[in-house]
Amino acid sequence: MVRFLSRRAALAAAAAALWGLASAASQAQAPASSAFPKQTIKVVVPYPAGGATDILARLFSQKLQEAWGVSVLVENRPGVGGTIGNNAVAKAAPDGHTVLMAITALIQQPPLMTLPYDPLKDFAPVSLVAKVGSYVVVPQNSPAQSLKDLVALVKANPGKYSYGSYGAGTSSHFQGALLNLQAGLDMVHVPFQGAAPLITNLVGGQLQAAFVDSASGRAHLKSFRPLAVTGTQRMAALPDVPTFQELGYHSFDPYGWFGLLLPAGTPEAIVARYAEEVNRILRLPDVLAKLESMGMVPGGGKPEDFAQTLRTDAGIYARIIKDANIKLTQ
């Protein structure tokens, strides 16, 4: 009996030793991401505080901090069209503790300027956070009741029509240039420093047309008349306004987007964890309500989905910039 127990004890001891070796080997092979996060997370916003990008970053950061139990801070790094903040993240350690809340401009800029980073190679896409469409609008007193009317008016009055955008090298600039190109128009581009002064001048009658994103224009829909919307489907808030695609125009499909990216080289496990968290946050009722109040559509999806969006949109905008001969000095 004693000899039997000793043998069983010996077997148990041997099993324990083997288990300990296996556990140690498993821990030695575990990816560095298993200890993530281990310090404060910094969400870089490449634009000033108070804008839509900043609001989304702070909303996301709050939810992330609650879920992961670490400090999540928003750092505004504005300047040079967002390139300063973008570059800070591109050059950051790829350990998951520095994140970028980017917008469409990230992939629109390469054909227009020399950048210290490659938007498609120096970042690891995580997920789309939100997207917005845009519309071409005219003042309420405009005789144009449709896009067809606007095109006819511009052609009948050469050199007399202008369109406003919220800045040179922005989506609204590209959309106006694209309409000029495809419809054979000569509307003069008038860039403003942001959407607020653009809308003020449009409503005040200083502009004959403008391209406005739905987040900026949502509160002013009664002050102007939308004639056509970008994107692949009509907007829920404007079910009677056709898409450019329906009206026979092309390359107006891309939405403006806000998305989360990490430095290239970040472990896949960390990228996947962020993506999972973004998708969870975007299902929260208070987050959905906030996005809806801002005129935005929630994003989500897998990292590879966002990566494909970046590549597709980059190609479309590069073609528009080349075909319309768009320059930042324009």
Image: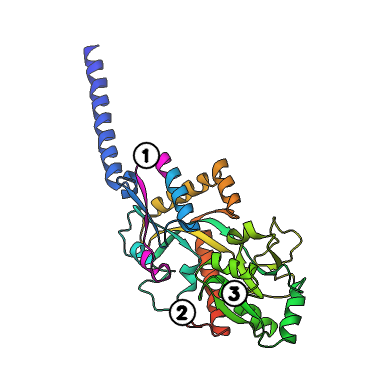
In the rendered structure, does residue 44 fall within the stretch colored magenta? no
Tell me how far mark 3 sits from mark 2, CA to CA: 19 Å
In the rendered structure, does residue 84 fall within the stretch colored magenta? yes
Q: Amino acid at mark 3?
A: Gly
Question: Do the residues under discs 1 and 3 have CB atoms within 8 angstroms?
Answer: no
Q: Amino acid at mark 1?
A: Gly
Dot 1, how many residues are within 10 Å of its Cα: few (below 14), some (14-19), or many (20+)? few
The residue lying furthest to the front in this view is 204
Give the mark nearest the N terminus, 1 or 3. Answer: 1
Question: Do the residues under discs 3 and 2 have CB atoms within 8 angstroms?
Answer: no
For image coordinates 74% across by 81% down, the residue present is 153
Q: Which residue is mark 1?
A: 69
Question: Do the residues under discs 2 and 1 have CB atoms within 8 angstroms?
Answer: no
Tell me how far mark 1 sits from mark 3, CA to CA: 45 Å
As drawn, the label of residue 34 is none
The residue lying furthest to the bottom in this view is 158
Dot 2, how many residues are within 10 Å of its Cα: few (below 14), some (14-19), or many (20+)? some
Viewer-proximal residue among 142 and 217: 142
Toward which corner of the image does residue 71 lie, by quadrant? top left
Q: Is residue 33 visible?
A: yes
For image coordinates 73% across by 75% down, the residue present is 248
Q: Picture coordinates of residue 125 (x, y %)? A: 45, 60
Q: Amino acid at mark 2?
A: Leu
Helix, strand or loop at disc 1? loop
Q: Picture coordinates of residue 62 (x, y %)? A: 43, 44
Give the mark nearest the N terminus, 3 or 2. Answer: 2
Q: Which residue is mark 3?
A: 164
For image coordinates 59% across by 50% down, the residue present is 293
Q: Which residue is mark 2?
A: 112
Start and end of the magenta stretch? Answer: 64-85
Horizontal side of 138 relative to 279 (left or right) equals: right
Up the image or down, 285 lies above or below 74; here it is above
